Image (cartoon, rainbow, N blue to C red):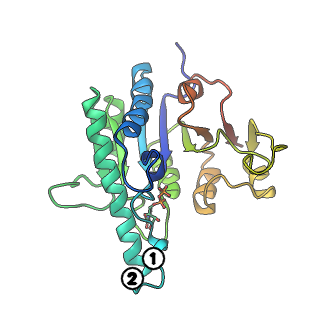
Amino acid sequence: MTLKYKRILLKFSGEALMGEGEFGLCASTLRKVVQQVKDLRDLGVEVGIVVGGGNIFRGAQIQGSGIARTTGDHMGMMATVINALALRDVIESMGMKAQVLSAMSIEGIATDGFNANVAKKLLSAGEVVIFAAGTGSPFFTTDTAAALRGVEIDADIVLKATKVDGIYSADPKKDPAAVRYSVLSYDQVIQQNLQVMDMTAFVLCRDHKMPIRVFDMFKDQAVIRIVKGEDEGTLVST
Ligand code: UDP
């Protein structure tokens, strides 16, 4: 079978791992997410993952407590490492090989730092590579990390998993007339002020002509349809 995308950068938020809970990790949700990764691997797709940390901690959430923003962001990045470690083990428990490359090294736990060359070799060898700790710098988001790692590993596309199945003209939960866009250009996203990723992440993708597809990860077969080149979610490209 011909695949449209051979190497992808999959981004999902920490909240995607929470299931029905309000905090932390849900075992069955983790397995559901990893099953999608397995479906991709079974097709031969090379999978790099950037996971958020919002199910545990976000740097901006504790303003006014005396905790400095940079410290909060360090805590947030560590939250992404927790999620990455969980993902690695679940991925391996489902018969795949996985490695965590972390922008923050934690002695004895996450010691392999990010290195694009190493990442590309691991991906070519069929390992799932999880990029932890975001960009490694405060004041950024894991969306920006996804854009950055996507460009660095020469991914064919950044796939951003969200709770809705694409980008809409208005919030579909509030406005029944909202329509889903199938394709948008980078310029249209900016002109219409559509929320795809934060601006830093978005501009990085635009400047490097990295396509972005926004989709619902829990919609059956969605990610598989995407790598096969079928219409699913919303594609943003030149
Ligand atoms: N973070 C950071 N630098 C980065 C990526 C993340 O400082 O490059 C911190 C920031 O505090 C952020 C938290 O890690 O709030 C968790 O990431 P994010 O909010 O992107 O997670 P998500 O909302 O996708 O779960």
Label 1, ligand 1: CB separation under 8 Å: no
Mark 2 → mark 1, Cα distance in angstroms: 7 Å
In percent of width and height, residue 3 lies at 54, 21
Q: How many marks?
A: 2
In percent of width and height, residue 125 lies at 31, 29
Q: Residue furthest right?
A: 177
Establish if 25 lies above or below 234: below
Q: Amino acid at mark 2?
A: Ile
Going from N to C along the chain, the mark reached first, 2 or 1, is 1
Residue 69, quarter of the rendered image: bottom left
Residue at image x 74%, y 35%? 182
Element marked by disc 2: loop
Label 2, ligand 1: CB separation under 8 Å: no
Residue at image x 40%, y 20%? 42
Asked whether the viewer can see residue 206, the reply is yes
Q: Nearer the viewer, residue 205 or 85?
A: 85
Quadrant of the picture in which ligand 1 is shown: bottom left
Residue at image x 37%, y 54%? 24
Q: Residue furthest left?
A: 108
Asked whether the viewer can see residue 114, the reply is no
Element marked by disc 1: helix
Contact check, label 2 and label 1, Cβ < 8 Å: yes
Where's the C terminus, which quadrant? top right
In percent of width and height, residue 206 lies at 65, 51
In the figure, is residue 89 to the left or right of 225? left
In the figure, is residue 238 to the left or right of 208? right
Q: Amino acid at mark 1?
A: Ile
Residue bearing mark 1: 62
Residue bearing mark 2: 67
